[in-house]
């Protein structure tokens, strides 16, 4: 019976050893990046939901051309963020499979070694059988030698049992590992399909956006309407700034009255800085559009440009031009993802078309701190930062305030 069990286990291990794997090692860095991307995706969805809610309250979503462009761009941004998550998840699955395959090769060597040892033992058992063990004991000249022979036989039996136990454990792990790798491969296929779906959605949204903008360009009346909406959007930013600043003053007054002290927003972060050196450059790059009248790159109509467009690769870090407090972090019509900083003395800076942000409203930031990444959200033709300097909500030429 024992011989049959040995033979069956040895044959089973020899046949199935190529499938043996161990659970993949954890990839902490990729897991952390996946979680970070998921958090960005959730934050983007939250901002978009807030923006769409505010637009719905105004009742202008159907009529506004900019809102239509924003909706398409938002869908594009969400799909792009989902692609980032899925790509990282795919990479993790591929890395896990690589680890499993590497472990498989190592375990195959161990199985081969154990199987070889078992094969030798089976040959010995076939040659000598149990009678030789009895002859070894009976041939002893005294009790001491007989006891020693019995002990040696017990050691051999224990070794045989250990080999058998190892084979049993490895065969069990083999089945578990085969199930694990099959599951990983199935999950990878599903993730790859989901990734392709998101890529298709992303490309479809881009095509829709381009087609919509093309229609606007072809119709002079629509282009002029879009230009008016853009001018209104620029004015709305100033109104938003004034509203938020007034809210901060009221909050400061309430806190002062209650003895809680004034909030950080009352601080002058520009102390000691003159007009020509008030702000540092938020990104380094070519100025593709300056402050003042220009032909709008999307609608091809004459319009006031309220800031500087600075070209930079996608996801280039955008830095705070000076110390200040985050007055706004969200989505604004035509501007895409935006961060607005309050620097004191009624000066604010606006950073628009961002791909992502890394600050929250009310947060105090130092000059040079990364507040977001370059993108092309909102009404933008390509990756760049739209940077504004405002005083009391009104636009100023940033070149008059940026450090030379």
Image: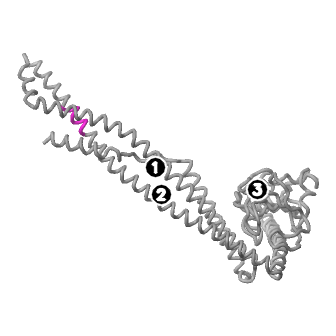
- In this rendering, the answer to whether 238 lies above or below 88 is below
For mark 1, what is the residue?
97
Task: Characterize the magenta stretch by its predominant secondary structure.
Answer: helix
Residue 162: in magenta span:
yes
Question: Horizontal and vertical percent for residue 39?
Answer: 61, 60
Q: Is residue 351 visible?
A: yes
Question: Horizontal and vertical percent for residue 397?
Answer: 91, 62
**Residue in the foreground of this view, choosing between 263 and 166:** 166
**Residue in the foreground of this view, choosing between 342 and 81:** 81
Q: Secondary structure at mark 3?
A: strand
Q: Quadrant of residue 228?
A: bottom right
| CA gap, disc 1 and disc 2 | 10 Å
Question: Going 80% across and 70% down the picture, which residue do you hit?
Answer: 298
For mark 2, what is the residue?
188
Contact between labelled residues 2 and 1, with CB atoms less than 8 Å apart? yes
Magenta stretch in the rendered image: 157-164
Q: Label 3: few (<14), some or many (≥20) within 10 Å?
A: some
Residue 401: in magenta span:
no
Question: Horizontal and vertical percent for residue 335?
Answer: 77, 68
């Amino acid at each position: 019976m024992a011989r049959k069990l040995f033979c069956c286990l040895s044959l089973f291990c020899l046949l199935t050893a190529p499938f043996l794997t161990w659970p993949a090692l954890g990839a902490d860095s990729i897991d952390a990046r996946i979680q970070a991307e998921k958090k960005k995706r959730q934050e983007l969805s939250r901002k978009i939901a807030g923006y769409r809610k505010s637009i719905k309250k105004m009742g202008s979503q159907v009529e506004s051309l900019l809102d239509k462009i924003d909706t398409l761009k938002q869908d594009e941004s969400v799909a792009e963020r989902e692609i980032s998550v899925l790509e990282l998840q795919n990479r993790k699955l591929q890395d896990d499979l690589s680890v499993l395959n590497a472990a498989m090769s190592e375990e195959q060597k161990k199985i081969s070694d154990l199987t070889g040892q078992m094969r030798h033992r089976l040959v010995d058992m076939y040659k000598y059988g149990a009678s030789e063990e009895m002859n070894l004991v009976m041939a002893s000249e005294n009790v001491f030698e007989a006891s020693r022979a019995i002990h040696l036989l017990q050691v051999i039996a224990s070794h045989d049992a250990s080999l058998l136990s190892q084979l049993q454990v490895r065969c069990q792990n083999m089945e578990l590992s085969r199930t694990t790798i099959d599951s990983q491969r199935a999950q990878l296929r599903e993730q790859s399909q989901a990734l392709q779906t998101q890529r298709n959605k992303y490309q479809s949204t881009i095509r829709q956006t381009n087609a919509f903008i093309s229609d606007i360009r072809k119709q002079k009346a629509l282009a002029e309407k879009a230009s008016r909406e853009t001018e209104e959007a620029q004015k709305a930013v100033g109104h938003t700034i004034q509203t938020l600043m007034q809210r901060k003053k009221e909050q400061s007054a309430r806190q002062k009255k209650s003895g809680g002290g004034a909030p950080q927003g009352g601080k002058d972060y520009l102390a000691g800085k003159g007009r020509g050196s008030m702000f540092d450059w938020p990104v380094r790059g070519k100025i593709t559009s300056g402050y003042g009248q220009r032909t709008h790159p999307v609608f091809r109509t004459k319009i006031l440009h309220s800031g500087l467009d600075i070209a930079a690769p996608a996801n280039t870090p955008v830095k705070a031009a000076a110390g200040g407090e985050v007055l706004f972090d969200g989505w604004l019509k035509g501007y895409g993802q935006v961060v607005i900083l309050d620097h004191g003395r009624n000066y604010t800076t606006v950073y628009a078309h961002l791909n992502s942000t890394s600050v929250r409203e009310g947060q105090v930031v130092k000059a040079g701190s990364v507040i977001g990444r370059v993108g092309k959200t909102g009404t933008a033709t390509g990756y760049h930062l739209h940077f504004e300097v405002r005083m009391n909500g009104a636009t100023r030429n940033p070149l008059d305030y940026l450090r030379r």
